[in-house]
Image (cartoon, helix red, strand yellow):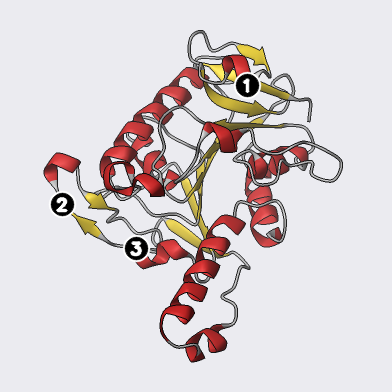
Amino acid sequence: MKGHFLLCAADFAFWDFSPDFFGKLCDSFGIGDPTTARRILSFMPGTNASLELMYKGVVSAADPYRSGSQQEFATWQVANSGGDLLGFVFKDGTFPQLDELAWNGPQLNAAADRLGANYTAFHQGLDATNLGGLPVVSVEHSFGSAAAGEAEANVTFDARVLLAPIGMKEGWQPNPDTRYTVYAAEDDINKLFYDVHVPVPFLDGLGYGAAPNAGGALEIRESGIVAENVIWKGLTAGLLGGLWTASDSVAHHNQIISSGNNDQVLFGVAGQLSGAR
């Protein structure tokens, strides 16, 4: 893994890694060596994504994947790819935030429209570079699946990997030229919101009607992340049991993009990426 760089929309040039200077100018944080790349991983983060989380973590022998950052999953994949995988972590736009739920929450379809348009522009720009002929696998976490689904109106991915996804907007249809794979923890928090859609025209709707457990074009794979302490949670009455369950569900929701304790997903996705040639 050669290093890091930023891909900038202004002229789609590669810059040396300098987040303090280029951080707000560039669409995506790049990981790997563009000169040896034979395939591309494009990572779309989900709810609560931010510039702070993009650059969080210190690369060291003890923590080579910037654990806890938005780079972690893509960094692991590039580092374990054999040198021909180029990773991008998308960061162009304001992502939904749970502490801004009323006006900038993940349930607002307008957020998927906005970030989907930005994701489209990034990939159209990437296609205009000398990397444009390489196969692209879009890997999306949580709300990111909705934004990537909107991008598909104008972009064709070789494959999409949906990690703990919220789903796509009502009316979404799979692209017959794209392979779709879904991984989610057994008790993932987003499963509570599958198939929830309320048409509200001036907000472009609430919730995501195209659930990622629908089968068909979506291949559902086991994540290896199982619900824990189910019996004890059932015996723990009321608020305490509910809080315990919710806490685990959120933790497992984020574990699926971790570089640790996540082997079934990490190696499963690595296998899919190696086939994108």
In the structure shown, which secondary structural element does the residue marked by tag 1 occupy? helix
Q: Earlier in the sequence, mark 3 or mark 2?
A: 3
How many residues crowd around disc 2 within 10 Å: few (fewer than 14), some, or many (20 or more)? few
Q: Is residue 16 visible?
A: yes
Marking on residue 194: 3
* Residue carrying label 2: 199
Q: Residue furthest top?
A: 11
Point out residue 275 in the picture as x, y percentages from the top left corner.
65, 44
In front: label 1 or label 2: 1
The kind of residue on which mark 1 rests is: Pro
How far apart are the two marked residues, 1 and 2, measured between alpha carbons?
39 Å
- Residue visible at 42% across and 61% down in the picture: 190
Please determine whether, in this image, residue 136 is positioned above or below residue 274. Answer: above
Marking on residue 19: 1
Q: Is residue 130 visible?
A: no
Q: How many marks?
A: 3
